[in-house]
Amino acid sequence: MARLPVALQLYTVRDQTAIDYPGTVAKVAKMGYDGVEFAGRPAGVDLKALVTKLKLKVAGGHEGLPVLQSQLDELIPLYKSLGSKFITLPSIPGEWREATDFAPLFKTLNEIGKKCYDNGLTLCYHNHEFEFKLKAGDLCFFDALYAGTDPRYLQAQIDTYWVFFAGLDPVDVIKKYAGRCPLIHLKDMPKDFTTLVRPARFAEVGEGRMDMKAIIAASEAAGAKWFIVEQDTCAGPSLDSAALSAKNLKAMGKL
């Protein structure tokens, strides 16, 4: 099968995009990434012109719930103009982590997701570890979220690191949500980080203790559309970390 496209989540290099957004994205393109995933949209940058010039595809972008609720009519044409098929909610607002009734949240996500779906886009949700620990009735929040929403209107961006951090096997979660997980976040965990308690530590893809080959194979079998490299924090320069992840994926034949 043809390999899946690989994007870099630009949150990885946020220290550099804050200084020179176009120049940093150009460096990412030179690393060989097929595309990018946005983490916010900088003022004064023509994103369409930038990605077109650099021949980068857009895997999607992270947009908070208040933004999705108030700016969806502007976001939909923007993402469509960028050639993206996905918009992702990166987490739920903090107040929802104290809730006992999630039905209103699921209703809101169905409504946002339906509007995306009707306009040719797919709304996704990006997990951390808490979704597997937070209870929603008899289920964990992660499972309740997808049980309580329409598959057409909400799909999963599975962050494999945080699944592992929660004490689960990412391969099992990917298999469970096959057909509903188009976006897969690839990130790695240092080999000497075994406590699985915060503060979390991160490694370049292929440099840590996670079974990347198994994760990638499961994702491909589950119908994923994009692999997205993300490293929340880097021990050295963030661009070096992004480049090393790209190098390792190339060595695996996945970039």
Image (cartoon, helix red, strand yellow):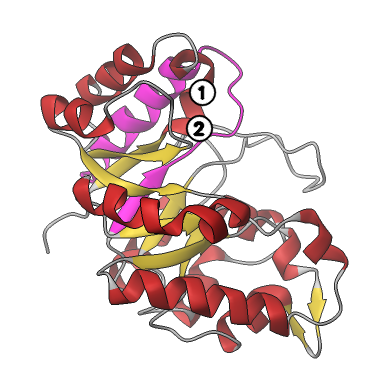
Is residue 232 found inside the magenta-colored segment of the image?
yes
Identified by mark 2, the residue type is: Tyr
The residue at the point 50 percent across, 43 percent down is: 187
Q: Amino acid at mark 1?
A: Arg
Q: Which mark is residue 11?
A: 2
> Which quarter of the rendering shows the N terminus?
bottom left
Q: Position of residue 14 (x, y in %)?
A: 51, 23
Q: Position of residue 246 (x, y in %)?
A: 32, 31
At a point 44% along the width and 58% down the height, the residue shown is: 72
Which segment is the magenta one? 226-255
11 inside magenta stretch: no
Which residue lies under the disc numbered 1? 14
Q: Up-down: is 44 above or below 172? A: above
Q: Quadrant of residue 33?
A: top left
Q: Residue at x 57, y 44 (%)?
A: 209
**Residue 56 % position (x, y):** 19, 35
Q: CA distance from mark 1 to mark 2?
A: 5 Å
